[in-house]
Image (tube, rainbow, N blue to C red):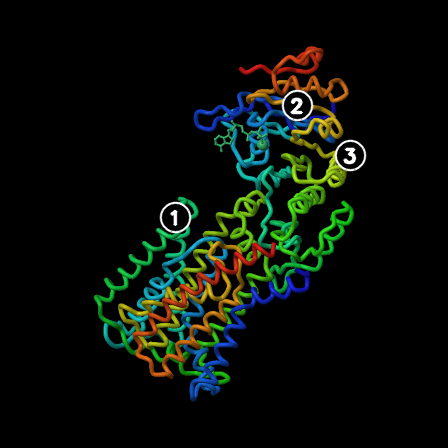
Amino acid sequence: MREPLLVLDNIRKNYGAIEALKGVSFSIGKGEVVALLGDNGAGKSTLVKIISGGLEPTSGRMIFEGQDYVARSPAEAKAAHIETVYQDLSLCTNVDVVANFFMGRELTRRVMGIPFLDERAMEAVVAKALANAGTRIPSLRTKVEHLSGGQRQAIELNRFVHWGGKLVLLDEPFAALGVEQTRRGLDMIRQVADQGIGVIIITHIMQQAFQVADRIVVIRQGVVAGDVERSKTSPDAVIEMITGQNLAGAGAAGGMGAVESPA
Amino acid sequence: MTPRMRKLLEFTLDNLVWFMLVFVLAVFSALIPNYFQLGIFANIIEASSVLGVMSIGLALVIIAGHMDLSVESVAALSAMAVGILFCSAGIGLGIKLTPAWLAVPVSLALALAVGGLIGLFNGWLIVKVKMNAFIITLASYIWVRGIVLAVSGGRSAQDLAPAIRWFAIQRFIGLPLTAWIAILCFVLFSVIMAKTPFGRHLVMIGGNETATYRAGIRVTRYLILAFVLAGAIAGLSGWLLAIRTSGATANLGIGLLFNAFAAVVIGGVSLKGGVGALPGVYAGVLLLSAINTAINLMGLPAVYTQVIHGFLVLAAVLLDTFKTRLRQKLA
Ligand SMILES: Nc1ncnc2c1ncn2[C@@H]1O[C@H](COP(=O)(O)OP(=O)(O)OP(=O)(O)O)[C@@H](O)[C@H]1O
Ligand SMILES: [Mg+2]
């Protein structure tokens, strides 16, 4: 396997009495794309939030680049170069495209020691990033509230591609995108991974997972129900892992990867 | 709708308050004898300095998505603190500093500190302990005014030290320095809000706090700072108030909160947070001041002022709702 980037070791998370994660372990290597699959409520978003600093695990350990890792806030995860695109979008619709693209990382020019926003430089960067990705937005100075759902998602996608980092978490990033934009998005993910960045992508669409992922990890009821190389499995086998039912003729899915059992 | 028309409509919505100000001034000038003179306009600006400064702090907090009802009482307490120390009559202790001008920075620092500390207290309870901003600052509105009453014993301080009074007397291009201080504050904070990362972050926090937190912006720190600023700015307005009245009374500044509130909302700041800019707020302040001056000139009994102000607040909130709806339709 490739050099491991992030290792999750027996991660548990309880929301009060609800056990959302009951001991999840898997790892992702540099430049690897892992598709995280699972039914609604399986615990995928919870896992992503634990890695990205939105939630603290109830127990368990994470090792990032060989060192113990825990993010107590999104700022800490960002400092470790972990970027996240959340399921519910994280844009401020009351400001324009440029402001959203640079949220929290504005370019500034100092005048007498005081940082002033360098709007022109920021706009140029955004224009270039969007053009590279083939995203068309009428004006970079329009407030995001005037943009369509797909355009908003495109901004978020372009944002993470631009900022890069070491690990990228994408929670259903294509839910609002059209066919063409989705294809571009999948291409972007491949490009990002080819730079040596690890990508974890959550999706409900099997076809997307098989198109882009190197490995497929299935979560069912808070545990890893399957962890297989894409080339060694089939959509039917994965569906079986997701639902936990034996589909006729699909064969034993469990044998294809390390199956974790709840401790 | 064509994009051009949409742009035009949006521009109108964003700058509505300036159009209203010009309209009101024009109507008053046409209808009220003696309204159209330079002196009156200077008077309008002069009369609005205390309210103007206070509105800046309130606007900051509302733009960041919160609320501060305590600014009026904070201003009163700062004014009272300055009054007690630097007034020579009434309950004033008449402290003399040498050289005499030292009273200016000392009294100013005192006013800012009193306001900033109360702001810190509010901010800490609201942001850290996560209590409701409305309730916490309503409580502060009451207990801070209570302290004003307690320390003054219901009496007043008069005859502020001349070195401080100088700011109300000294004029520059027809306006007293107190008015210039207000204008300077508006320019300063307008630039901060529109041109610096700090202002940009406050606006974004008001728009979507979760998103800014996820983006790694230190939301807690920013919000507490917003409350501290609102408090300190209220303290400054209290300092101006003490200068203008040359002292402080126990009920100083009562009613200012609702005027500030009206000015902020009329000025285009949305109560939902994340929307609005300070130049508009200044226009809102001038609009209120223009109306007050008209009421005075027409010789209406002062009791009506309150009724009119009440309706103005109501109109402002209606306008806010109306604009939000219209914007949604545009989107
Ligand atoms: N804040 C919360 N409080 C209580 N329970 C929660 C909370 N968030 C999630 N859960 C529960 O934890 C479990 C996992 O939720 P999670 O959002 O991680 O699922 P998911 O796999 O992302 O589902 P989906 O595909 O629908 O996005 C669910 O049973 C959910 O009800
Ligand atoms: Mg989810």
Residue A227 visible in the current orientation = yes
Residue A177 shown left or right of residue B235 in the figure: right
The residue indicated by pointer 1 is B132
The residue indicated by pointer 3 is A194
Residue B224 image point, x, y percent? 45, 52
Which dot, 3 or 2, sits closer to the camera? 2
Q: From the viewer's perspective, is residue B198 above or below residue B291?
A: above
- Residue drawn at x 33%, y 58% is B141
Crowding at dot 3, Cα within 10 Å, few <14 / some 14-19 / many 20+, comes out as some
Chain designation of label 1: B
Residue B98 shown left or right of residue B20 in the figure: left
Query: In terms of secondary structure, where does tag 1 sit?
Result: loop
Viewer-proximal residue, B45 or B11? B11
Marks 3 and 2, how far apart at CA = 20 Å
Q: From the viewer's perspective, is residue B211 above or below residue A223?
A: below
Residue A110 image point, x, y percent? 64, 61
Displayed quadrant of residue A186: top right
Q: Are marks 1 and 3 in contact (CB under 8 Å)?
A: no
The residue indicated by pointer 2 is A217
Residue A69 visible in the current orientation = no
Q: Amino acid at mark 3?
A: Asp
Query: In terms of secondary structure, where does tag 3 sit?
Result: helix
Chain designation of label 2: A
Q: From the viewer's perspective, is residue A187 above or below residue B292?
A: above
Residue B79 image point, x, y percent? 34, 68
Q: Amino acid at mark 1?
A: Asn
- Residue drawn at x 44%, y 67% is B263
For ligand 2, give the image quadrant: top right
Viewer-proximal residue, A111 or B121? B121
- Residue drawn at x 48%, y 58% is B321
Labels 2 and 1 within one chain: no
